[in-house]
Amino acid sequence: MTGESLLGEGAAVPDGGSGLVAWLFVSDAVLPERWRDRAVRMSLVPLLPAELSSLLPETDPGGERGLSEADARLAQLVARGRPRREIARTLGISVRTLDRRLMVLRQLLGADSLAGLTAELGRRGFGR
C-alpha cells in the first residue's frame, strides 16, 4: 500500500527526493498546523482477545508469535512439558544443540529458566 493510496487520488506525499517516506502518529490535539493539510485521519481500536484471535491465521503455529516454523515446533514440544531427550529425538538433534536452541528461545521470550520458558510458551498458546 503506498502513501498515495492512503491519502486519496491525486494527493502527493513529499519524500525530499530520497524516495523514503516516514509516518508519525500524533493526536489531533498536538498536530502542528503546518502538517494539517497532509494529515490522514485514522482510528486506533483496541481489540478484545476473541477479536484478535479471529483475525490471526491458525495455519501458521509460530509466525504470528514471531517465531520461525522450527522454533514454533520446538516451542510446542516444550510447552507440552516433553522431556529434553524426547524433544531432541523428535527434532532429530542432539541434546546439546537443543540446549543451545532453548537458550536462544529463553532470551527471546525473557525467560530465566526452562520452567519459566515452559510457562511463558503455555501462556502464549503453544501448549494447545
Image (tube, rainbow, N blue to C red):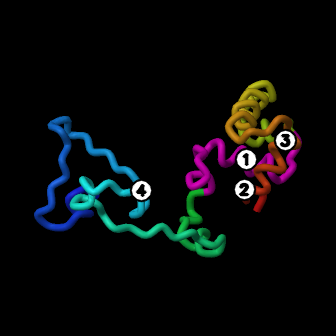
| Residue depth check, mark 1 versus mark 3: number of the one nearer the observer | 1
Question: Pointer 1: what residue?
Answer: 75
x, y percentage for residue 101? 71, 32
Task: Check disc 4 and report its element: helix, strand or loop.
Answer: loop
Mark 4 and mark 3: Cα distance apart in space = 51 Å
x, y percentage for residue 57? 54, 65
Residue 64 magenta = yes
Query: Are the residues at dot 1 and dot 3 in contact (C-beta closer than 8 Å)?
Result: no
Task: Check disc 3 and report its element: helix, strand or loop.
Answer: helix
In magenta, the rendered stretch is 61-83
Circle number at residue 86: 3
Label 4: how many Cα within 10 Å (few below 14, some 14–19, many 20+) = few
Question: Pointer 4: what residue?
Answer: 26
Q: Quadrant of the N terminus?
A: bottom left
Q: Earlier in the sequence, mark 4 or mark 2?
A: 4
Which of 92/20 is in front?
20
Question: Pointer 2: what residue?
Answer: 124
Label 1: how many Cα within 10 Å (few below 14, some 14–19, many 20+) = many
Q: Earlier in the sequence, mark 1 or mark 4?
A: 4
Residue 103 magenta = no
x, y percentage for residue 123? 78, 57
Q: Quadrant of the C terminus?
A: bottom right
Residue kind at label 1, given as amino acid type:
Ala
Residue kind at label 2, given as amino acid type:
Arg
Q: Assign the magenta stretch its main secondary structure.
A: helix
Task: Check disc 1 and report its element: helix, strand or loop.
Answer: helix
Q: Earlier in the sequence, mark 1 or mark 3?
A: 1
Mark 2 and mark 1: Cα distance apart in space = 10 Å
